[in-house]
Image (cartoon, rainbow, N blue to C red):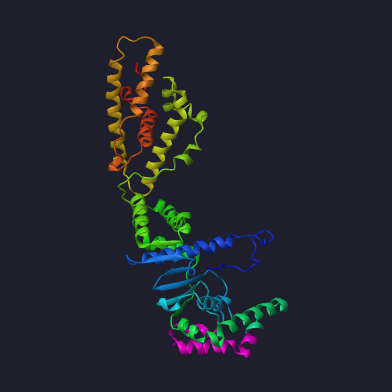
Amino acid sequence: MDTTQPENATLPGAAPLPFDATLLFKALQYQLLVAVEYCYDLAPSECMWLEAMGDVTVPGKTQAEVKLYTDSLTDSHANFWNTIKNWLHENFERTSFKSLVLLTTQKFGALTLLKGWNTATPADRLAIMESIVAPSQVDANTNSKDEPDAEASAAKASKSKSLQQYVMAPERRDALMEVLERMHITTGADSLEQRLQNYETRHLKPIRPSKCKQFIEELLGFISSPQLVIGRWVITHKAFTDKLSELTHRYMKHPRTFPAVDVKALKKTINAEEIRPILFAQKIVEIGGETHLKEAALHRVVAQTTISDLYTDGVLFKSMVDLYLGNHLTQHRYGRALAMLGCAGVTCPAALGTRSMMFYLERNALAVEPFCGLENTMPEFRNGIYHILASEEPEDEDDEFHWRLWK
């Protein structure tokens, strides 16, 4: 894994900061997206490791080094040489993999000898590397016009030459040939933005459009979860499949389960004073329910937000919502009529207020009828439906929604 910009990259209108780590996190996000793609290809008996043996590893199959970079992949570029150096480590089991992959967003440099790498034989690849480390080639690379600072260029060239010498050392030749037999270079890989878009296009067709971003964020959150990292950052076929099933079940276009609602976030938007003039709030206040106003307002927003989101994604039609609202209005009217019979002969305003408040709480505590057949429909949603109905002023006053148990 690596970053896309040189160390002196700056933010618009700001001086460069040596401790700006945003690019590092962008590179990590990129690595996680690559890891997700590898997870899709896992067989039931396989698993994927992150960082333990390199960036992305499927034991017995593939080890991939992931580079998010903007410059060209040239003959002397550290991404090429350092990757091979990592694979030459004495504890790295090269022969256990069928392929060793250098995946980079870089494109081959115009004059690089590496362009024919993937079609070359191991012997040809060794010959390419020997040509690169030849003094004349090293001189040509270190005198690049793209590096006007002579001192910096010299230091970079010295580091590059040292790295090349390590890789090409005779005592590592057998290990190097094992690497060259398996090595593949993928250049011009999609950028982070392109990879995100491609993931959505390829894998999220069954997902509601408004939830695609949340789906990806939760999947990446799962991949990088502390639980997995602490457990040596290994992801099994089953764990990945289970997470996909969970997210798909939750965010699919025609869901079976009531959609998740961020109640805590919605609660922060509620201002009790602002909602007091609204009709549903006035009907709660008239029965002495001031302490329940903020909760009622929250439930109303939960219902409104859920319905709006499902409308946006084409999951709902107006007739479906109207039917649900109509059913609850009818049930409420009969329930209120029954409760009013129990108040026959009661004339004390305080007593009627108390009974009305009891009726309010009983109705809010009723078992929830599934909304459009969705499992686990939230009580907050159903109660929000009550408050939506209480906000309406029907043409026939007999159809109006009330909590009070008096005319």
Q: Decide if residue 204 is in sight here.
A: no
The secondary structure that dominates the magenta segment is helix
Q: Decide if residue 91 is in sight here.
A: yes
- Residue 154 in the image: x percent, y percent? 69, 80
Q: Quadrant of residue 299?
A: top left
Residue sitting at 51 percent across and 90 percent down? 127
User: Quadrant where the C terminus lies?
Assistant: top left
- Residue 389 in the image: x percent, y percent? 36, 30
The residue stretch that appears in magenta: 112-140
- Residue 47 in the image: x percent, y percent? 38, 65
Query: Was residue 133 drawn as part of the magenta stretch in this picture?
Result: yes
Total tally of numbered discs in the picture: 0
The foreground one among 398 and 214 is 214
- Residue 196 in the image: x percent, y percent? 45, 62
The foreground one among 378 and 286 is 378
Give above or below for 243 relative to 376: below
Residue sitting at 43 percent across and 55 percent down? 222
The foreground one among 13 and 135 is 135
Residue sitting at 50 percent across and 83 percent down? 176
Query: Was residue 153 drawn as part of the magenta stretch in this picture?
Result: no
Residue sitting at 54 percent across and 62 percent down? 26
Q: Is residue 42 left or right of residue 84?
A: left
